[in-house]
Image (tube, helix red, strand yellow):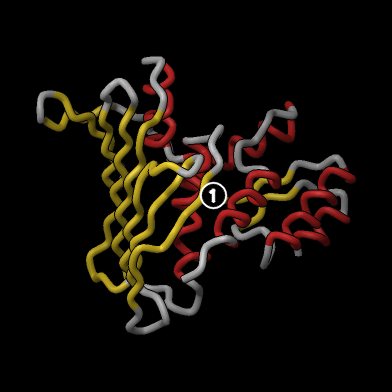
Amino acid sequence: IGKKILESNKHLFIEKPAGLNKSETIQLLNLAKKQNKVMMVDYVYLYHPVWEKIKEELKTRSEKPLSLITSWLKWGTFETSIIENLFCHEVALAKNLFAESVIEARKLMSFGLISSSDIVLLELLGNKKNIGFSFINRLSENKNKIITVKGTNGSNFIWDNNKLYEILNNEKIELPIKKITALENECSVFIKAIKDENIISTDGEFAVKVQQIMGNLTI
């Protein structure tokens, strides 16, 4: 479908994964370049106002990221690999946050009940060094996603569902964020890129990098 859209001389906003494998995504990327069209891949968490606020605060404080820890509890979906369906979002966050590093991931623990793998613990590596961990449990009736980011100067942020907190003197201080949904923000970025030829952080090249990281991971 994505190929037909680009061949019809249309811009492409496509759900992840853009291709069933890295090779297919590269084909779409090359076609988008040939047609001179925008190709945006839907890694929606990168456009959440909480995530953008975390990156903005680090930049304002001239601080680099030190670690990324994610915990995700939910129920299902079991028809798709937990890596392709869920962990891809954590990989995208890591690649976006540690943009200058070579990102890798390795399995520390995996447990399957309904599918071959429903609970996983993975280590995130940047330039061969630990930059964090990711825990995913898709057997939980409680739905919750928590992301913590630590900066090199000691800043500590907690993204708890749709709220952002900073840890100061052992207390959680809620920080204000923009009143916009991640999807609204994402769509506006896509439209602006079409009008003004803005650079998109989740373009086809980014999608290829995410799939390459996951392709080197075995569960």
Residue 116 placement (x, y as % from top left): 42, 81
Residue plotted at (45% across, 46% down): 125
Residue that sits furthest to the front in the current view: 128
- Extreme left residue here? 170
Left or right: residue 116 versus residue 34 is: left
Asked if residue 46 shows in the view, the reply is: no
Residue displayed at 43% across by 19% down: 59
Instruction: Give coordinates of residue 166: x percent, y percent.
Output: 23, 29
Q: Which residue is mark 1?
A: 43
Q: Is residue 56 left or right of residue 8?
A: left
Q: Position of residue 39 (x, y in %)?
A: 72, 46
Task: Find numbered disc 1 in the image and state the secondary structure of the residue it sits on.
Answer: loop
Left or right: residue 37 compared with residue 40? right
Whether 201 is drawn above or below 207: the answer is above
Viewer can see residue 217: yes
Q: Residue at x 29, y 41 (%)?
A: 148
Q: Quadrant of residue 180?
A: top left
Residue at x 33% of width, y 76% of height: 111
- Position of 90 with respect to 17 (left or right) is left
Q: Residue 99, how many percent across, how many down?
A: 54, 34
Which is more toward the observer, 14 or 136? Answer: 136
Furthest-bottom residue in view? 114
* Rendered view: 183 above or below 141: above
Q: Quadrant of the N terminus?
A: bottom right
Camera-side residue: 189 or 208? 208
